[in-house]
Image: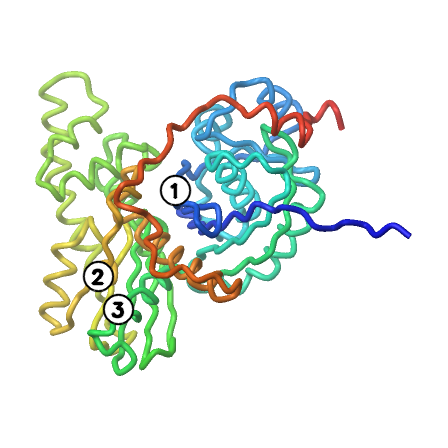
């Protein structure tokens, strides 16, 4: 009697995903010894018909644009979603609503960027969601596992893999966990708050003596500032203009020239008038945003220390520092964590701090569960240089997994 040999040499891929509204981010590595890499993609998504997928399947595969087929539904994500299909970042929807195609896209991108050639893959996924949405994780896990079993259609074939673990954490939890491992601050004897300021919302977590006792969220993200700035200037700006956020961010460095490029006027004197208007309105909007944020925080909790992270936090760093100094509450940026200098290849800076801190926690968890002794080896060595990112599709993967277009179904 012949015994069926079920042993396979699986490639393990560990990935931490942050479905940010201004940028979709991730940290991925081949587990256990692969060096982590940063993944980033524009947040736009659009649902497509079969004909559009047939067209896209004949285009050059790009890492910044992904199309995904899940069951009978198809989506394009990234830069092309907005430029060609009028996709949106779905800021008014729960992140969970589009989580499945976005997670699937990040998984494809991770496997592609990591150069995985083995068709036998095990996935270990850690997903960050806003406070209040994390409970949707089990439903999402079941859907993802089923689709990975039958195969998710991608530009390089059907993506099939075994989903070994799928954990969901609230945004900011990675920073909180990182801070808890600092033996010098008596974390487990204090009440410590975690304030995450993102593009869509602001989230707050309170830990009392190591126990999370409160978690709240509000719509006071950078989107609030952008919306108010566009409405109050009333000179034809679009809140969907990608240059708007970066221009507003530049003003924190006293670079108000960046605002000039927002003007839609052609005559110099009219353009100068717009810049004067922008410089007058922006401080007002910034102050009102801070006031709204303070009102929200005032009634939440008393704290011994507050941790602050998120891209929007950098926009009001001075105001945050002055406010908490005035309240007598020590402020710690990113939980005291510093990004490895060889990790931030996308120039995202503090915007990937929470994803990186969460990935560290993810890897520590896997090491414990899989009994791997890391011996304090750094995840990102000082001498490491990430490989050149090629846009040429891996033909071996196409052939072994089967390059499937909708016309072949």
Q: State the residue in front, 191 or 323.
A: 191
Q: Position of residue 76 (x, y in %)?
A: 54, 32
301 above or below 156? below
Judged left or right of residue 23, residue 278 is left
Q: Which mark is residue 297?
A: 3
Instruction: State the SS at label 2.
Output: helix
Q: Nearer the viewer, residue 155 or 35?
A: 35
Query: Which corner quadrant holds the C terminus?
Result: top right
Q: Closer to us: mark 1 or mark 2?
A: 1
| 11 sits left or right of 295 in the view | right
Q: Nearer the viewer, residue 250 or 283?
A: 250
Expressed as whole percent of the image width and height from the top left, the position of residue 282 reads: 16, 43
Mark toward the start of the polypeptide (3 vs 1) = 1
**Along the line of sight, which residue is nearer the eye, 324 or 119?**
119
Q: Point out residue 339 in the picture as x, y percentages from the top left corner.
A: 26, 50
Foreground mark, 3 or 1, reads 1
- Image point 30% across, 69% down: which residue? 181
Crowd band around label 3 with a 10 angstrom C-alpha radius: few (<14), some (14–19), many (20+): some
**In the displayed structure, does residue 95 sit left or right of residue 404?**
left
* Label 2 Cα neighbours within 10 Å, binned few <14 / some 14-19 / many ≥20: some
Q: Is residue 33 above or below residue 275?
A: below
- Where does label 2 land, which residue? 336
Quarter location, residue 180: bottom left
Report which residue position mark 1 lands on: 37
Give how far across and how far down residue 79 sits, in percent: 43, 29
Which residue, as the protein is rendered here, is positioned at the far front? 1
State whether residue 222 is above or below residue 108: below
Q: Residue at x 18, y 52 (%)?
A: 316
């Amino acid at each position: 009697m012949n015994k069926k040999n079920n042993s396979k040499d699986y490639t393990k891929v560990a990935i931490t995903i942050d479905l940010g509204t201004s940028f979709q981010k991730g940290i991925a590595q081949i587990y256990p010894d692969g060096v982590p890499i940063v993944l980033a993609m524009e947040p736009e998504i659009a649902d497509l018909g079969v004909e559009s997928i047939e067209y896209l399947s004949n285009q050059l595969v790009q890492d910044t644009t992904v199309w995904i087929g899940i069951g009978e539904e198809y989506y394009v994500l990234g830069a092309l979603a907005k430029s060609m299909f009028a996709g949106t970042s779905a800021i008014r929807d729960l992140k969970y609503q589009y989580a499945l195609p976005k997670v699937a896209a990040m998984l494809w991108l991770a496997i592609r960027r990591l150069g995985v050639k083995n068709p036998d893959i095990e996935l270990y996924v850690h997903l960050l969601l806003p406070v209040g949405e994390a409970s949707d994780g089990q439903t999402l896990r079941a859907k993802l596992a089923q689709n990975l079993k039958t195969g998710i259609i991608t530009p390089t074939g059907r993506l099939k893999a075994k989903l070994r673990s799928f954990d969901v954490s609230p945004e900011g939890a990675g920073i909180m966990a990182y801070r808890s491992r600092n033996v010098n601050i008596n974390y487990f004897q204090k009440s410590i708050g975690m304030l995450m300021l993102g593009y869509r919302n602001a989230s707050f977590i309170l830990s009392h003596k190591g126990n999370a006792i409160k978690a709240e969220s509000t719509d006071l993200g950078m989107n609030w500032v952008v919306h108010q700035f566009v409405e109050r200037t009333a000179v034809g700006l679009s809140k969907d203009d990608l240059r708007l956020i970066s221009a507003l961010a530049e003003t924190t460095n006293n670079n108000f020239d960046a605002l000039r490029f927002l003007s839609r006027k052609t005559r110099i004197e009219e353009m100068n008038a717009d810049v004067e208007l922008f410089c007058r309105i922006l401080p007002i909007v910034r102050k009102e945003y801070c006031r709204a944020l303070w009102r929200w925080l005032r009634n939440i909790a008393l704290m011994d220390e507050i941790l602050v992270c998120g891209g929007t936090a950098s926009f009001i760093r001075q105001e945050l520092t002055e406010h908490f100094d005035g309240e007598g509450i020590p402020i710690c940026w990113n939980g005291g964590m510093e990004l490895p200098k060889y990790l931030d290849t996308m120039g995202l800076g503090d915007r990937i701090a929470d994803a990186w801190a969460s990935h560290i926690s993810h890897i520590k968890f896997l090491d414990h569960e899989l009994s791997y002794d890391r011996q304090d080896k750094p995840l990102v060595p000082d001498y490491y240089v990430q490989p050149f990112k090629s846009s040429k599709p891996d033909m071996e993967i196409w052939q072994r997994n089967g390059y499937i277009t909708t016309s072949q179904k």
